[in-house]
Amino acid sequence: MPPLEIPAEALSDDALRGVIDNFIQREGTDYGAAEISYDSKVNQVHRQIAQGLVKIVFDPNIESVSLMTTIEWKKFRAKD
């Protein structure tokens, strides 16, 4: 089965926060010379999702949720 885009509105606030937290923790904390607080990182990702720059993607084959940029998602979908 192909991965599916999940609209942010389909998730509860807690579930969306969990997806964002998981993404930030997996991606690490190297943001260059300036340190960014965890809450700022969460807000940045949340804003990117709200603006449509980042997609929430569920892969039913491995039962995993991840975030991808809209550009990555379009390239991925073009392969299908």
Image (cartoon, grey):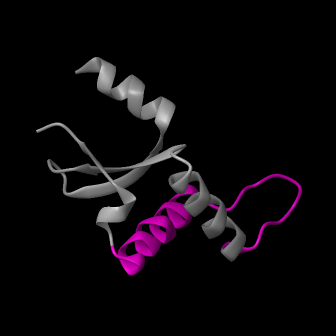
Residue 72 picture location, percent across and down: 46, 32
Quarter of the image where the N terminus is located: top left
Choose top left, top right, bottom left or bottom right for residue 25.
bottom right
Q: Look at the picture and state if 60 lies above or below 45.
A: above
Q: Is residue 29 magenta?
A: yes
Horizontal side of residue 42 vs 33, given as left or right: left
Farthest residue, direction bottom: 14
Residue in the foreground of this view, choosing between 26 and 77? 77
Horizontal side of residue 17 vs 51, given as left or right: left
Choose top left, top right, bottom left or bottom right for residue 12.
bottom left
Residue at point 31%, 26% (across, down): 77
Q: Look at the picture and state if 52 lies above or below 34.
A: above
Q: Look at the picture and state if 61 lies above or below 24.
A: above
Instruction: Look at the image and give the residue range highlighted in magenta.
Output: 12-38
Residue in the foreground of this view, choosing between 57 and 8? 8
Residue 78 picture location, percent across and down: 32, 19
Residue at point 16%, 50% (across, down): 60
Quarter of the image where the C terminus is located: top left
Horizontal side of residue 39 vs 79, given as left or right: right
Farthest residue, direction left: 1
Horizontal side of residue 65 vs 30, given as left or right: left
Residue 11 picture location, percent across and down: 32, 68
Query: How many numbered discs?
Result: 0
Residue at point 83%, 66% (across, down): 35
Residue at point 34%, 54% (across, down): 7
Q: Look at the picture and state if 65 lies above or below 75.
A: below
Residue in the foreground of this view, choosing between 38 and 12? 12
Residue 63 picture location, percent across and down: 19, 57
Q: Is residue 69 magenta?
A: no
